[in-house]
Image (spheres, rainbow, N blue to C red):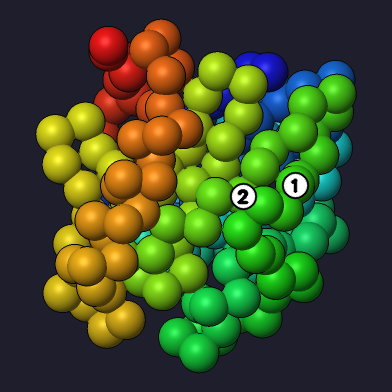
Amino acid sequence: MEIHRVTVTPLRSNCFILKSEGELVVIDPGGDPERILRRIDEFGGRVVAIVATHYHFDHTGAVEEIRSHYKAPFMIHENEVPFMKDTKADRLLIDGDEIACGAEVLQVIHTPGHTPGSICMLGDGFVITGDTLFQHGYGRTDFPGGSEEEMLHSLAKLEKILVAGMTVYPGHGLPFEVKV
């Protein structure tokens, strides 16, 4: 699977475009829709899903433009619905759901704490963590719906999943490799 990172918004959020066998999944299109659309067109392929790791504007700000342009379904965890104002999901996700991208499958890992419906997307040898996990810390828990206790449980859950050599693609900052 090819993974391309596009940094968007003044908050420098990471939008990821995943590609496998001509299919694309766009994760966290937080803003700057023109840049994201341009990058998608450069990579070529058919957008089969738009996924948000959580509802915050810096991860969903360009959803409507991307969805309208490519007629692709928007997906988010069901626990985010009460916080969403301007966007309606086409598919609500739960822990363990799978999203196909070409020949590969992404698994939804529910990791509440930053928000009630925060998710990570687990692939073969990588994980996209949104604002759950960064290289030197984790996402804030003081926003509406956030919980330090749930975040600590989610980090413990991820610790069991992450293995040495796996690449972590966070919602902000550079990707990094899991060490032993």
The type of residue carrying mark 2 is Val
Could you tell whether 162 is left or right of 52 in the image?
A: left
Residue 162 in view here: yes
Percent coordinates x, y for residue 34 in the rendering: 55, 48
* Front residue (pair 31, 18): 18
Residue visible at 36% across and 70% down in the picture: 115
Residue visible at 57% across and 36% down in the picture: 122
Q: CA distance from mark 2 to mark 1?
A: 6 Å
* Front residue (pair 5, 151): 151
Say which quarter of the image contains residue 158.
Answer: top left
Say which quarter of the image contains residue 173.
Answer: top left
Q: Secondary structure at mark 1?
A: strand
* Front residue (pair 72, 178): 178
Residue receiving disc 1: 98
Percent coordinates x, y for residue 175 in the rendering: 34, 24
Would you call the spot at circle 1 few (<14 residues within 10 Å), some (14-19), or many (20 or more)?
A: some
Residue visible at 21% across and 31% down in the picture: 135
Say whether marks 2 and 1 touch (CB < 8 Å): yes
Residue 42 in view here: no
* Front residue (pair 179, 136): 179
Residue receiving disc 2: 108
Residue visible at 63% across and 21% down in the picture: 124
Q: Secondary structure at mark 2?
A: strand
The type of residue carrying mark 1 is Glu
- Mark 2 or 1 closer to N-term? 1
- Placement of the N terminus among the 4 image quadrants: top right
Instruction: Tell me the tag on residue 25.
Output: none
Could you tell whether 54 is left or right of 125 in the image?
A: left
Percent coordinates x, y for residue 174 in the rendering: 28, 26
Could you tell whether 99 is left or right of 158 in the image?
A: right
- Placement of the C terminus among the 4 image quadrants: top left
Asked if 124 appears above or below 25 in the picture, the reply is above
